[in-house]
Image (cartoon, grey):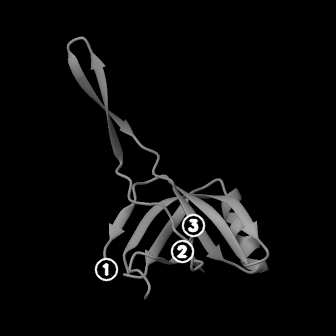
Amino acid sequence: MGELPGKPKKLVMDGNTFFYMADADPAYGKPKWAITALPHSGGIMHQMILQDLSTTGHRVKCNGAELSLLKTLAEREDSYPISWTNRASDTYTCTGKITFESASAANGSVELTVIPETDWTEFLG
């Protein structure tokens, strides 16, 4: 079985490129708004709630120097451009920050959460 076109390929943060691990599976594609139903005596009222557009599961390959760079990016107070591309060349971009979740010395990988401050913009391949 070949690669799925939606499998992630690379993550670019502030001009630095990182390649995804083969088993990386970032969660993405949530709509900006969630609609909830609030029942009341006169029927049902719909409420729109702005969702957190953070994406988890960004597992990237890295060596010692790249690990240091990722830690520096995670500690920055200002936002920077972030984009990730899948194997079908669909690219998702935003301006935001990352949270450093974990690192594995055994396979040279780091797991990140991307926290956008602007909406994700899609450029579909």
Mark 1: amino acid = Gly
Left or right: residue 9 compared with residue 67 = left
**Which numbered mark, 3 or 2, is in the foreground of this view?**
3
Quick check: 93 above or below 17?
above
Disc 1 marks which residue? 125
Mark 2: amino acid = Val
Residue at (73% x, 78% y) in the render: 108
Residue at (45% x, 62% y) in the render: 94
| Mark positioned earlier in the residue sequence (3 or 2) | 2
Mark 3: amino acid = His
Left or right: residue 6 compared with residue 106 = left
Do the numbered discs 3 and 2 sit on residues whose CB atoms are within 8 Å?
A: no
Quick check: 81 above or below 20?
above
Do the numbered discs 1 and 2 sit on residues whose CB atoms are within 8 Å?
A: no
Residue at (42% x, 43% y) in the render: 51
Q: Position of residue 6 (x, y in %)?
A: 40, 75
Looking at this view, is 81 or 111 the one in front?
111
Disc 3 marks which residue? 58
**Quarter of the picture holding the C terminus:** bottom left
**Which numbered mark, 1 or 2, is in the foreground of this view?**
1
Marks 1 and 3 sit apart, C-alpha to C-alpha, by: 20 Å
